Amino acid sequence: MGITEIGEMNGPNPRVSVVVPCFNEQDNIRDCVDGIAKVLWAAQIPHEILVVNDGSSDDTLARAHSLTMFNSSVRVIDLGENCGKAIALKEGVRRARGDIVAFFDADLQYSPMDLVTMIARLGDGLDFVNGTRDYNGYGASRTAFSRLYNRVVRFLFRLELRDSNCGIKVLRREAADADTIFNYGLPLVVPLLKIRGFESTEVPVMLHERKNGESKYFQDGHFLGGSKNIRDITYHSIMLLNLLAHIPFELGLRDRPSTAGPDS
């Protein structure tokens, strides 16, 4: 994986690093980054925005690069090939300089204002804030799959949080360990952090219908959401069982001197 990076790293570290993974989002990336920057500047939150290009085959990378010419807070990380969203987030988190790390999808289905609300909630002993979607931007089939998965996760891990796979998350640097946080896949970051002893809360977020591009995971009108969604369901089911098996090794990990975890 030949990773390259464009963007300045001068000056003091920002308070918040927003990691934006993107794959073939040429029609969304500019509005996404501009929207994030606008609300964070208005809220007077020192920040950087790390756009992680996950091997896009369209004009996403070039358009992301152009943003660095007009906004010094933007950095672009190019993975050089399509590695998947979890790897894109991992490489973004690895390079983030802020005391707080946020995840934000590039597809414009989430509102940057919700990001500001979640950053403000990260206090009073909380280690991470998770979004919970209203599902207004999803079709009936995709909503049913997502809610079923979340019910299974809540039951197996005794979680109060309702939406483990929401695309907006805000974490303190201590919780955002790039080397281990994605060991069991992206949908299981929330239960993994809870098992490790990190305190959390959940904030309702609006989910808008995608206007440009198409979902990378779910195909409406196809059996079980299409072949890629079936592969994802199989993979994440295996990862779920893997995390259940490793709970004794993950319990209270934040309080141990070493944060090494099992390979995924």
Image (cartoon, helix red, strand yellow):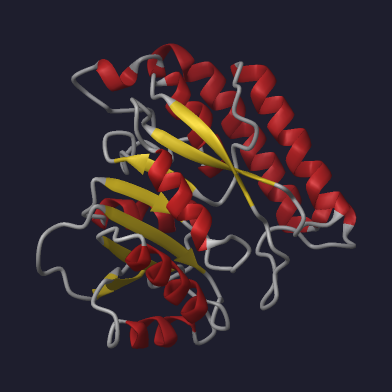
Residue drawn at the location 65% of the way across and 54% of the way down: 206
* Picture layout, residue 42 above or below residue 181: below
In-image side of 217 versus 83 (left or right): right
In-image side of 63 versus 208 (left or right): left
Is 232 in front, or is 209? 209
Residue 83 location (% of width, % of height): 47, 61
Residue drawn at the location 56% of the way across and 19% of the way down: 244
Is 85 in front, or is 162? 162
* Picture layout, residue 38 above or below residue 152: below
Residue 26 location (% of width, % of height): 54, 82
Residue 136 location (% of width, % of height): 77, 55
Which quadrant does the N terminus fall into?
bottom left
Is 254 in front, or is 85? 254
Residue 215: which quarter of the image?
Answer: bottom right
In-image side of 65 versus 194 (left or right): left
Residue drawn at the location 46% of the way across and 45% of the way down: 118
* Farthest-out residue, top: 248
Which quadrant does the C terminus fall into?
top left
Residue 49: which quarter of the image?
Answer: bottom left
Res. 50 visible in picture: no
* Farthest-out residue, left: 11
Residue 37 location (% of width, % of height): 38, 70
In-image side of 73 versus 112 (left or right): left
* Picture layout, residue 194 above or below residue 175: above
